[in-house]
Image (tube, rainbow, N blue to C red):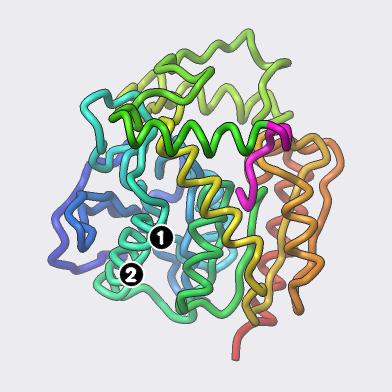
Amino acid sequence: MTVATALPPAPFYAEVAQGPKDVVAHWITAADGPRLRVVYWPAEPAKGTILLFPGRTEYAEKYGQTARDYVSNGYSVLTIDWRGQGLAARLVPDVAKGHVHKFRDYQHDVHAMVAAARDLGATAPFFLIAHSMGGAIGLRALHDGLPVQAAVFSAPMWGINMHPALRPAALAIGVISQLTGRSQNFAPGQSGDMHFDFDNFDANSLTSDREAYAAMIRQLQAHPALALGGPTVQWVYSALRETRRLAAMTPPKLPCLTYLGTEESIVDPARIHSIMSRWKGGTLHMLTGARHEVLMETPPIRAKILTETCAFFGKSHY
């Protein structure tokens, strides 16, 4: 299937993505200036289009297998490299730093992504799948009227997993760093180290699937420009403030499934349980033994999520 569009072409590393062969990548520009990358896997014929919101440090190629799963079930998939990561514009001179000025800035990226979906002729209806940081961006976008008929969240970052006593300190450091011009410094305990080791599998917090973990490492070894290090003080400060605001809001009136692993250690499970307990029309599925990257878990877990979400999207057509 050939997609005709005036959007400028962007690089895409198909050999490491291992996604559907029919794929296009384009540059788009957010309203406030940063250049972003979108990648589109069209299904033919398509039942609809999934807007896939990745997490912090992630990039389009990482979701090649996920795209293959959904395209094979009749759903086109469009994903994005958020500002500051992947091949999108980095926001500070040190490209290893994960930085954002304000979390709300990601909504400019969402708007540009939705416009790109229309430019690409993506088939309606639209659905959302959002992972980790993309879950915070996605929940805010739903509150702002993102034009999707149903949403699926994968270990959404509706809170960061840290000791409650550390939250006030992290917020205070964020304020002080702004006053002292140090908001672009790495957050305490973070660095630009982007080294991944095949031998570190047992200690990894992302997936219990050894091959999925190895695939992530191979992608970054082949294309180091995709990698990102730790977050800045400003990113952490902005993320804590945004997730606190989202937690205080009434969940949107939209069908929703959320998946969370029992071995989650990156995002805050308690915050997810709290929001989902108040989400009318929402269901939380706990996945025994799964770590953070539930979409890149063992084949049985991935198959369960795929079957349930495709059925969910099918029932959400109206």
Q: CA distance from mark 1 to mark 2?
A: 7 Å
Q: Is residue 180 above or below residue 303?
A: above
Q: Quick one: 40 or 139, which is closer to the camera? A: 139
Residue reaching furthest bottom? 318
Q: Is residue 316 above or below residue 73?
A: below
The amino acid beneath tag 1 is: Leu
Q: Which mark is residue 78?
A: 1
Mark 1 and mark 2 residues within 8 Å of each other at the beta carbon: yes
The amino acid beneath tag 2 is: Ala
Percent coordinates x, y for residue 104 in the rendering: 39, 58
Secondary structure found at label 2: helix
Say if the magenta span includes residue 159: yes
At 28% from the left and 64% from the top, the residue drawn is: 112
Q: Which mark is residue 166?
A: none
Q: Quadrant of the C terminus?
A: bottom right
Reading the image, the residue beneath label 2 is 117
Q: Quick one: 236 or 45, which is closer to the camera? A: 236
At 52% from the left and 54% from the top, the residue drawn is: 242
Percent coordinates x, y for residue 48 in the rendering: 49, 75
At 67% from the left and 48% from the top, the residue drawn is: 155
Q: Is residue 289 left or right of residue 111?
A: right
* Principal secondary structure, stretch drawn in magenta: loop
Q: Is residue 219 left or right of residue 258?
A: left
Magenta span of residues = 157-165
